[in-house]
Amino acid sequence: MSVQRFRFAPGVTRRLAAALAAVFFFVTAVLVPAAQASLFSFDLKDERELGEKFNALIRARMPLIEDTEVNDYIQGIINRLVRVKPPMAFPITLGVINNNAVNAFAGPAGYVFVYTGLLLQMDHESEVAGVLAHELGHVSQQHIAKRMGEMQALSIGQLVGVLAGVILGQTTGNRDLGSAVAIGSQAASAHAYLKYSRDDEREADQVGMNTLVAAGYRPQGLVEAFETMRRLRFMQGGGVIPTYLSTHPGLEERMGYLRDRLKLLPKNVLDRKDNDVAFKRAQMLVRARYTDANNAVAYFRKLGDKATCLDKLGLAIALSRSLADVSQAKSAFETALACGGKDALVLRESGRYFLKIRDFARAKSLLQAALRQNPRDIDANYEYGRMLAQEGNYREAVTYLDQVRMRVPENPEIRAIYGQVLGQAGDIFHAYLNLTYAAIYENNPRQAKFQMEKAKAAAKNDDDRRELARLEETMKKRSAYWKKRF
């Protein structure tokens, strides 16, 4: 989905992204099978509650994106890995964090988060899959779940803060960041329970390798992911490499036994080839849309005659974001269309650009063509819905924006625009309802309370009041994290 997580909110994204550092193999997750939950005095109900609160905290504190190409791509890798693993107690729910950290981590109850830096720094899909397979290995082996029973003195509310604090502190190497979300005086001592041991890491490596092979990936991907991290650590002096990985005493040993495992695999497995078509598309979008615009422009221009149609699109997107080169963006999009104008991604991104410069006729034609190829593309639906609203066709705009809202319910910008269009279409109650959700997901308590009062005044029937009750429950859950923001 290329709707900037639809976490468009650029100001919020920059503020939150600035608080994050680099990251890699640290999963705080646990999907506790019902048969064994009683062993840890931490049952599925507890985990579900912890997972929901953990998810709310992470989404309130970290900049997420929703992009059809990027999110669906990563979800596809996860689905492929999960299919060959033993049944999980919870479905996997994905979030993509907009930051250069090279990491993925899984939280309780199947909430998995992947950093965009993981796509940027890896060379092949099998390496990304290797990282995710390792993380899911921690999940299936219950490495965190086995310690939950030892922390019975903590409430669920305290535990979610401890868990998030350990993740942000350990995986980013930023202790202040971890401390900012840790709840309760027990947080410091909890680290001893939640830290992975060398045996845990070795087991996650072995299980991850098994999963990678069973899913049909090139098994060398996991080792190559380690090697990439080691190279980055050397080149950057460890500054952007997660503290946990760069200081772990068993890294070389782990790479050694993984190489030994590779020697035992059949030749037909070792000879598997990477299929990086979807990986390259997702990687291009991350670089062009979510990294520094001027750096992205320089990267794509440096390719010169070697630039593919996809690279030409990347240059156009980056130019449209660069204040220094915005005047050249139109020519770059024309070049991308001439090269790959039948590609739904090229059509969508070009349509988005022409809408931005208010060439509505061109934008409409391109976005309609993109939607014919991929009706589920939330970016194309979002941009087309916005265009219809600008034309004054509010009721039809609502149908497109509602599809986006259903797929990306927690994005503040989508909720805000959807609410505005509903108001223009005459649906006052749902307009205020969605504006309240937008303020909640934007972590804006004053605006949330203001819009909530407007929604209450506009409610007319029992259905409206039931929706208000759900809204109030959402506000109650999110407001727990409003007082402690980075």
Image: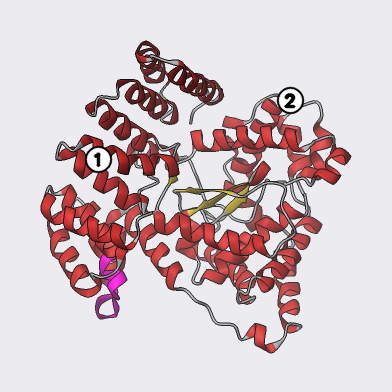
Q: CA–CA distance between discs 2 and 1?
A: 47 Å
**What coloring was used for the rendering?**
secondary structure
Looking at the image, the residue that sits furthest to the bottom is 267
SS assignment for the magenta stretch, majority: helix
| Residue 283 vs residue 413, the one in the foreground | 413
Secondary structure of residue under mark 2:
loop
Instruction: Indicate the position of residue 386 as horizontal and vertical percent values.
Output: 24, 42
* CB contact under 8 Å: marks 2 and 1: no
Residue 301, picture quadrant: bottom left
Assess whether residue 303 is covered by the magenta stretch: yes
Nearest to the eye among marks 2 and 1: give it.
1
> Counting other residues with Cα less than 10 Å from the Cα at mark 1, is it few (<14), some (14-19), or many (20 or more)?
few
| Residue 427 vs residue 312, the one in the foreground | 427
> Counting other residues with Cα less than 10 Å from the Cα at mark 2, is it few (<14), some (14-19), or many (20 or more)?
few
Secondary structure of residue under mark 1:
helix
Range of residues picked out in magenta: 302-314
Q: Mark 1 points at which residue?
A: 396
Relative to 402, is 439 above or below?
Answer: above
| Residue 304 vs residue 78, the one in the foreground | 78
User: Is there any visible trace of residue 317 in the rendered image?
Assistant: no
| Residue 15 vs residue 344, the one in the foreground | 344
Q: Name the residue under label 2.
A: 155
Residue 29: image tag: none
At label 2, which amino acid type do we have? Ser
